[in-house]
Structure formats: structure tokens, C-alpha cells
């Protein structure tokens, strides 16, 4: 009986996340193929009118047409995926093909923009809507400290302390650019919109959902975070899915 209830709850959760909400944010650990399989199935269930990809620039997304979505090799070549630094395209292509009628939006922050934000500031680089997305003001001191500590740990405690504030600024820019792409997708297609991004951008407390809550508070959002081997994941997700961990080299080896 208990098992049946758990199965029913699982089915209801999936059904709710694939219902008529405006935005479905699907987090990932980038190199975990099982996470992309989950994203593919959720996109199939949702049938979104638009998909926002962290992995694509705005210019790359503009090149994607429905006829290309049926040709993996052509799409991969057009996007110059092999040179992009993202994991193998075979992990991501099923997501593209899962919603062949969906309009594709890109929200990757370019290296030039990442550099510029360190000298010119968030408002200048983001543009006219900076106030709408809260980029015209500093973070609360306690949150700034937490984020800097997270950036330090994420970079194997190898970065000088003076670089950490800049890393936080870049993260804020990336979150806000993703959120702006979602708002644009909603306005242009009517939604629903799926978002393919890393868990760090997906988190409700200060990731893309937080920026959407400020810029477009009427949007209905469901946020999925994905972890490995049932490890803890912070950020206030609506749903957390765990998959087996991927074998990968020590990420800190390059800092030694």
C-alpha cells in the first residue's frame, strides 16, 4: 500500500510539473547523461513553445530552425558545439529533438560580456532593464559573503580573495540574462517555456527563478534540481531528482 502511494505521489509530481505552468526550469550537472535524459522526458511531457538554453548564445539560437532539429550532425556543426567546451552533444541533442516545434532561445553570456561586467558594472552591461532585474544594487552583505565562499569552494579554494567578488558579479549577470530570455520567450510565444541550465542557475533562492519573481512575478514556475547519489542540493527546488554519479577526473587537479 505504501509503495503504491509513493508511486502515485511520484506520478502526480511529474504531472504537475508538466502541467500548464508558464516556466519549467530543469537543472543539471552538465556532464551527467542521466540528467539530460530526465530533461528530455520532461520537455516531451511539457510540449513547450520555447526552450531557453544556457549553452547557446543569442546568435547561435537564431540559427536553429525546425528542419535542423532532425539532423544531429548538421545542428552540432552549425552550433560549433565541439569547440564550445560543453559536454558531448549526444547528451543535449535529444532535448532539442524532443520539442521540434519549440522556438529556441540562447542565454549564454559571452566572454567579452563577462570581462566587461568587471570593469563597466552590471547595469551597463545588462542594459536598460537592469533595474527591473535588480542589477542596479548590491547584494545584502550576508548573501554576498555566502556567494563568495561558494565561488571559492567551487574553484578549489585556489582563487585569490580579490577575484571572488567579480565571480559573483558574473554569476548574477548569467542568472539575469537567462531570466530575461525566459521573459522574452513568454512574450513572443505565450509559453510554456522550458529552461535547460545548471543547478546553480536553477536554484529558487537566488538563481533564475528569483530574477523571474522580481521581473515577472505573475509567472507560474516549477523548478527541478538534479543531484548525484542522493547528495544534498541547496537552493529551494520544487523537486529534486537523483541519478548515479558520473566518474570524472579530479576537478581540482588543474589548480595544483
Image (cartoon, grey):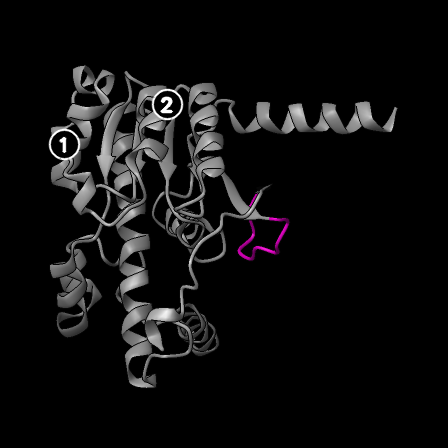
Q: Quadrant of the C terminus?
A: bottom left
> Could you tell me residue 204's position as x and y percent?
49, 51
Q: Compared to 93, does 202 lie above or below?
A: below
Report if residue 142 is visible in the image.
Answer: yes
Q: Residue at x 38, y 70 (%)?
A: 253
Q: Compared to 102, does 164 lie above or below?
A: below
| Residue 114 in which image quadrant | bottom left
In the rendered image, residue 253 lying in the magenta stretch gets the answer: no
Whole-number angstrom distance, CA of label 2 to CA of label 1 = 25 Å
Furthest-right residue in this view: 1
Which residue occupies the foreground of this view, 138 or 229?
A: 229
Report if residue 221 is visible in the image.
Answer: no
Main secondary structure of the magenta stretch: loop
Q: State yes or no: discs 2 and 1 in contact (Cβ < 8 Å).
A: no
> Could you tell me residue 56's position as x and y percent?
22, 41
First in sequence: mark 2 vs mark 1: 2
> Could you tell me residue 229's position as x and y percent?
62, 49
Is label 1 in a helix, a strand or a loop?
A: helix
Residue extent of the magenta highlight: 229-240
Which residue occupies the foreground of this view, 122 or 51?
A: 51
Amino acid at each position: 500500500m505504501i509503495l503504491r502511494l509513493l508511486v502515485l505521489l511520484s506520478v502526480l509530481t511529474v504531472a504537475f510539473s508538466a502541467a500548464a505552468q508558464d516556466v519549467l526550469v530543469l537543472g543539471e550537472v552538465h556532464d551527467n547523461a542521466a540528467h539530460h535524459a530526465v530533461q528530455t522526458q520532461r520537455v516531451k511531457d511539457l510540449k513547450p513553445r520555447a526552450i531557453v538554453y544556457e549553452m547557446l548564445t543569442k546568435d547561435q539560437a537564431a540559427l536553429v530552425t525546425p528542419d535542423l532539429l532532425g539532423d544531429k550532425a548538421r545542428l552540432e556543426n552549425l552550433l560549433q558545439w565541439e569547440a564550445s567546451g560543453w559536454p558531448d552533444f549526444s547528451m543535449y541533442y535529444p532535448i532539442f529533438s524532443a520539442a521540434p516545434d519549440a522556438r529556441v532561445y540562447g542565454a549564454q553570456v559571452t566572454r567579452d560580456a563577462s570581462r566587461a561586467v568587471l570593469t563597466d558594472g552590471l547595469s551597463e552591461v545588462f542594459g536598460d532593464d537592469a533595474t527591473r532585474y535588480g542589477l542596479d544594487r548590491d547584494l545584502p552583505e550576508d548573501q554576498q559573503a555566502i556567494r563568495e565562499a561558494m565561488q571559492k569552494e567551487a574553484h578549489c579554494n585556489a582563487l585569490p580573495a580579490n577575484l571572488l567578488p567579480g565571480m559573483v558579479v558574473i554569476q548574477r549577470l548569467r542568472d539575469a540574462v537567462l531570466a530575461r530570455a525566459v521573459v522574452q520567450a513568454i512574450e513572443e510565444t505565450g509559453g510554456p517555456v522550458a529552461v535547460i541550465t545548471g543547478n546553480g542557475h536553477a536554484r529558487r533562492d537566488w538563481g533564475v527563478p528569483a530574477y523571474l519573481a522580481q521581473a515577472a512575478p505573475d509567472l507560474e514556475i516549477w523548478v527541478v534540481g538534479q543531484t548525484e547519489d542522493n547528495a544534498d542540493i541547496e537552493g529551494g527546488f520544487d523537486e529534486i531528482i537523483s541519478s548515479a554519479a558520473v566518474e570524472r577526473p579530479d576537478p581540482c587537479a588543474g589548480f595544483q
